[in-house]
Image (spheres, helix red, strand yellow):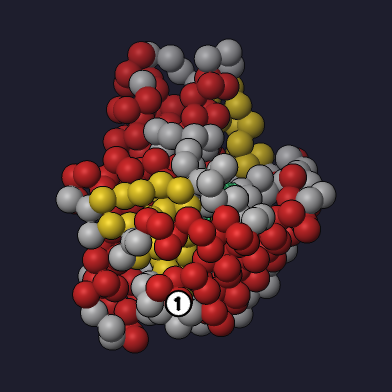
Amino acid sequence: MRIAVTGKQGQVVSALLERGSVAGVEIVAVGRPELDLVDRASIRAVFSQIKPDVIVSAAAYTAVDKAESEEELAFVVNAEGPTAIAEVAKGLEIPIVHLSTDYVFSGDKQGLYVETDATGPVSAYGRSKLAGEQGIAAANPNHVILRTAWVYSPFGANFVKTMLRLAETRDALNVVADQRGSPTSALDIADAVIAIAKRLSADNDENLRGIFHLTGSGEATWADFAEAIFAGLKTKNGKVVSVDRITTADYPTPAKRPANSRLSNDKLKQTYGIVLPDWKESTKVVLDRLL
Ligand SMILES: NC(=O)C1=CN([C@@H]2O[C@H](COP(=O)(O)OP(=O)(O)OC[C@H]3O[C@@H](n4cnc5c(N)ncnc54)[C@H](O)[C@@H]3O)[C@@H](O)[C@H]2O)C=CC1
């Protein structure tokens, strides 16, 4: 099976390239310059040449704070581009698997978010990703939208790498302790995406299509996540870094973030039998690679 994935150096695309060979699946990464999400013509041209069985839409404008001042560009990249890809997939009669985000929700709910909960993004990035979900769903019923969250990996830029970099020069760090979510390893996302793509290309059942939540098992605050990273660092090289728990109000950012990012993964478990590993286990796997 051949999977075309958008982007060349992102966390999820890098993980797919690595895990694809383990799963015996050919992964073709397409990104700039031959595929630019702001250029519809490039989107149309590239996939008919590759002839994939499934398209995975992983590339995105992911600079959450910068999007506040570049909302128009974020919309083109996160909504118009993926919608055009879904149209191409429809024309090729193949499924599209698209990565979306917990930031489509406001974070005001008390419990875990389920797929049918009302959306209500509180940031430009979240609004652009929600518009992408809606554009894809309207363009091609043969879609799976995977809302994930707090993605980290050995690749690209992410929270784990930022914490390890800061630990080189600091003994204590202030980390936000009033946002809850589920850290999710891009390596685990890649395994799930490949399993889902295989099912989609073999089975037309409409229950396999639609929106699904896909996050690491268990939950944490950013401060918990940082502590787990520094515990791993301590066992590796003895360096001790302490975490000072602060509130979101103590750490103002241009984009507002949901206080509650916890997503229920029950639908994915019931439909596909997929459950991602506990975030603490997957964090150890990534730390082993980075340290
Ligand atoms: N990183 C995170 O914490 C989260 C990410 N997501 C979603 O998961 C998906 C994958 O995220 P990551 O791998 O972490 O992202 P990333 O930021 O590591 O990679 C994004 C990729 O998109 C590419 N890209 C950006 N603009 C482009 C354009 N105009 N044309 C072509 N390619 C372009 C970049 O070159 C890069 O390869 C994205 O859709 C993102 O919105 C969802 C929730 C959380």
Identity of the amino acid at label 1?
Lys
Residue at numbered disc 1: 90
Front position in the image: 71 or 183:
71
Q: In this view, does 278 lie to the left or right of 87?
A: left
Identify which residue is drawn at 53% across, 35% down: 157
Residue 217 visible in the snapshot: no
Front position in the image: 202 or 61:
202
Q: In this view, does 242 lie to the left or right of 198?
A: right
Identify which residue is drawn at 49% across, 24% down: 164
Front position in the image: 31 or 106:
31
Q: Position of residue 97 (x, y in %)?
A: 41, 66
Residue 247 visible in the snapshot: yes
> In the figure, residue 15 lies in which quadrant?
top left
Identify which residue is drawn at 65% across, 66% down: 80
- Image position of 115 with respect to 146: above or below: below
| Structural crowding at the residue carrying mark 1, measured as other residues with C-alpha within 10 Å and reported as few (<14), some (14–19) or many (≥20) | some
Identify which residue is drawn at 28% across, 57% down: 2
- Image position of 79 with respect to 21: above or below: below
Secondary structure, mark 1, is helix
Q: Position of residue 82 (x, y in %)?
A: 56, 64
Looking at the image, which residue sits at the far right? 69
Q: Where is residue 210 in the image (x, y as percent from the top left)?
A: 43, 79
Quadrant location, the N terminus? bottom left
How many numbered marks are there? Answer: 1
Quadrant location, the C terminus? top left
